[in-house]
Amino acid sequence: MFDLRHPAFRPLWSRALVTGVALGWALVELSAGHKGWAAVFGAAGGWCFYQFFVVFDPADYIRKDDDDG
């Protein structure tokens, strides 16, 4: 769905921002009583947290050239 290995996500601040916005929006939806949307954004935030902080490897975020030649 989204390329979470994009070089833009290498800095800590960008990973924390994306994760925080997703989890924060889940709380907004939950406080409004929309449990379904809260689950969607909570799952997205949880996936970002897992990818950005649990299994993070800086080598995965280095730009690679598309051509082999």
Image (cartoon, rainbow, N blue to C red):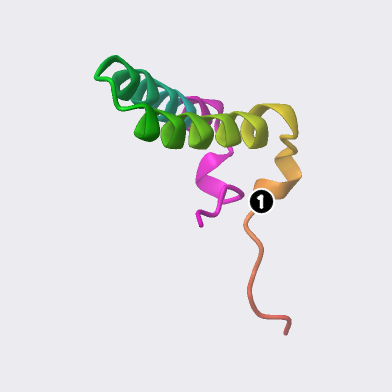
Relative side of 28 to 14, left or right: left
Residue stretch rendered in magenta on the structure = 1-16
Q: Position of residue 19 (x, y in %)?
A: 48, 28
Look at label 1 and name its amino acid. Answer: Ile
Residue 5 among those drawn in magenta: yes
Which one is in front, 1 or 64?
1
Residue 52 among those drawn in magenta: no
Of the 4 image quadrants, the one containing the C terminus is bottom right
Q: Quadrant of residue 50?
A: top right
Relative side of 23 to 55, left or right: left
Residue 51 in the image: above or below residue 4: above
Residue 32 in the image: above or below residue 6: above
Report the residue marked by disc 1. Answer: 62
Residue 27 in the image: above or below residue 39: above
The tally of labels here is: 1
List the single residue furthest toward the bottom: 69
Give the residue at x 62% y 33%: 52
Say which element carries label 1.
loop
List the single residue furthest toward the top: 31
Q: Position of residue 64 (x, y in %)?
A: 66, 63
Which one is in front, 13 or 27?
27
Q: Position of residue 20 (x, y in %)?
A: 44, 23
Give the residue at x 57% y 47%: 4
Relative side of 18 to 32, left or right: right
Give the residue at x 59% y 36%: 47
Q: Quadrant of residue 55?
A: top right
Mark 1 Cα within 10 Å, few/some/many (few <14, many 20+)?
Answer: few
